[in-house]
Every structure is written in C-alpha cells, then in structure tokens.
Image (cartoon, rainbow, N blue to C red):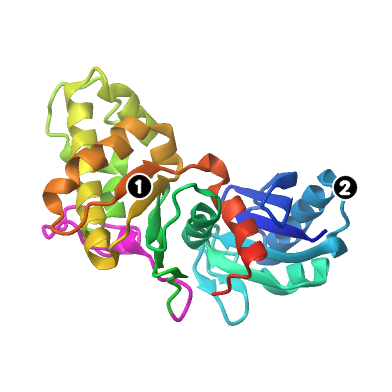
Amino acid sequence: MAWYAGVDLGATNIRAVVGDGDGHVQGTGKKGTPQGPSGIDITERVLDTIREACSDANREPTEITAAGIGSIGPLDMTTGVVRDPANLPDTIDQIPLTGPISNLIDGPASLHNDANAGAIGERFYADYNPDNMIYLTISSGVGAGIIVDGNVLSGWDGNAGEVGHITVDPEGTMLCGCGKRGHWEAYCSGNNIPRYAKELHDGEETSLPIESPDMSAADVFAHAAEDDFASSVIDRVADWNAQGMASIIHSYAPLVIYVGGAVALNNPEAVVERIRDKVPERVMTNVPDIELTTLGDDVVVKGALASAITGIRR
Ligand SMILES: [Zn+2]
C-alpha cells in the first residue's frame, strides 16, 4: 500500500498527517512553530512533525510515496522555500521545505499556499466538489484557493488568490497590513476586526473594552449578541465580506464557496450566514452555495495530503 504525508505550516503551529491513497488519515503530529532564530529551525521542526505523524501511523518516513505542504507565504516556488514570511519574526528570511522533506521521505514534495491547499482538500474530500469552486479563509488574513474548470489557479509565483487585498472600500478608511488602503482583509481579518471597531467607535455607549489594546475579534463577536455597537461592527464586517465575495464570484464563477479559517469557524452564523444573506443583492451572475468548510481545522493539512495523493503540482 502507498502512503502519503500532508503538512500544514502555520505561524503558530505545524501539523502533519500520514494517510493512505484514499485520504484516510492513519497518523498525526503537531508541534509549535519555532519563532526563530532562523528558518532552518522551522525546517527541522517540520521534519520532526512528519516523523511524529509517521511514528503515529507505524510507518517509516522512507515508506512515504509523496508529501504535500500547505504553508504561510509568500512562497518561492522555484526553490520550494517560504521567503520573508510576513507573520514570523524578521530574523527568519527563508524556510526551506520541499528539498529537506523530499530527502526525508525519499519522494517528491509539493508546496502550495495554505488557501490553495484548502481548495485542494475541499475538492478531494467534500461530497459537493464541482470543477468550479473556491475555498475562502478568514483568519489572521483573508485569502482564497480558486479552482476554475478543474484547475487550481496558482499564478507564476504560486501566490494567485490573494483576494484579501482586493480593494472593497474606495474611501480607504482602513490601512491594510500590506501598506495599502481599503483592502478586504483590513476590515475583516481576525487581526483587523478590533482595529476596525476602534475606527468606527464615535463615543457610543458600548460594553466592548474599546480602549483596551487587548480587545480581540472574539470580544467583538461575543459582545454583538447584547451590545448595539458591537452588533453594528459585525454587520459592517459582513457587508465588506459580502462585497469581497461578490468580486470573486464575478471573477471566477464558482458553484460553491467553502469558508474556513478561525474567524469563520468560531462564528459561523455571524460570518458565513450573514455573507450568504448579503451576497445575492450584490451579484448579477449565478449565486453560488456558500458553506462552512467541511473539514474544520483540518482543511489545510488534509488538503496538503490530498495534493500528495493526486499529484497536483503548482
Ligand atoms: Zn492589503
């Protein structure tokens, strides 16, 4: 029997799975992502996490036929490394992945950005998996993996689908982490929802800890049930989400959009259901199904596994 490995490299955690050719997971591993000092330390931890998953599945790494990786970016596809990752300390300039993993398993390793891995995972595992579908993640950032006519869109550098940087607000109220104004994720990502709440606040009475530097997106969602201001923030966030969603629907004509990432997974009614309500009035073409991911937290690591099984390259 052939065995495959999938890896999810995030800014906080590294996860790995080992599975068979049908995508059934037989072993798992999970470790914290080292915050340096160098990228090599992260590479070593990735290899350790794969070894842990192999051991959990009672397999040797050399029994693995192929591996897939879903990773934070930006990616350098020609060398198979993550270069200057945005959400890790500045001392980390590059994280070699495909070369060292390929040496460990003695087989090919393919690298995908995490949203593309999510799309590959939904295509492989979901019951409804048409040739035209999108996986959208709303977490610390906003991004998409896009499948058109059965092909996963990659772009020349593997960074297609950076839809979080679509301009949704022509007034450009919010500054995005990328340095430009008015981008989708500047309003709707987990990091930016509390910033946006502070921006909107104009002296209204609210139970939110609006002055606290520690106010989180979770606080805004938690207070929205009973606090008019928090509720209005969540509604504005849903408007921007629907606006961004309408842009990708018009661009790619999907039949279904699966939504994942911590912000969506933790607040499916306030995020996914509201998008579903607000999208139709903004779309002139077919309105796709808009669903919470079927794979929960496993969407990237299972997508990475699926990419190894199906041999999907960039
Ligand atoms: Zn941006």
Q: Are marks 1 and 2 in contact (CB under 8 Å)?
A: no
Nearer to the camera, 129 or 250: 129
Local secondary structure at mark 2:
loop
Quadrant that contains the N terminus? bottom right
Dividing the picture into quadrants, the one containing residue 273 is: top left
Q: Which residue is mark 2?
A: 58
Mark 2 Cβ and ligand 1 under 8 Å apart:
no
Magenta residue check for 174:
yes
Give the distance between the C-alpha atoms of the residues marked 1 and 2, in whole angstroms: 39 Å
Residue at x 11% of width, y 57% of height: 171
Nearer to the camera, 130 or 145: 130
Q: Is residue 215 visible?
A: no
Horizontal side of residue 98 vs 85, given as left or right: right
Q: Position of residue 256 (x, y in %)?
A: 35, 52
Q: Is residue 16 above or below residue 69?
A: above
Q: Is residue 5 above or below residue 293?
A: below
Q: Residues within 10 Å of mark 2 (few under 14, many from 20)?
A: few
Dividing the picture into quadrants, the one containing residue 252 is: bottom left
Which kind of residue does numbered mark 1 sit on? Answer: Ser
Q: Is residue 154 above or below residue 92?
A: below
N-term-proximal mark, 1 vs 2: 2
Nearer to the camera, 313 or 131: 131
Q: Which mark is residue 189?
A: 1
Horizontal side of residue 235 vs 164, given as left or right: left
The span shown in magenta is 156-180
Quadrant that contains the C terminus? bottom right
Residue at x 18% of width, y 42% of height: 278
| Residue found at the very far top of the displayed protein | 226
Predominant SS of the magenta segment? loop
Q: Position of residue 300 (x, y in %)?
A: 55, 52
Dividing the picture into quadrants, the one containing residue 262 is: top left
Nearer to the camera, 207 or 286: 286
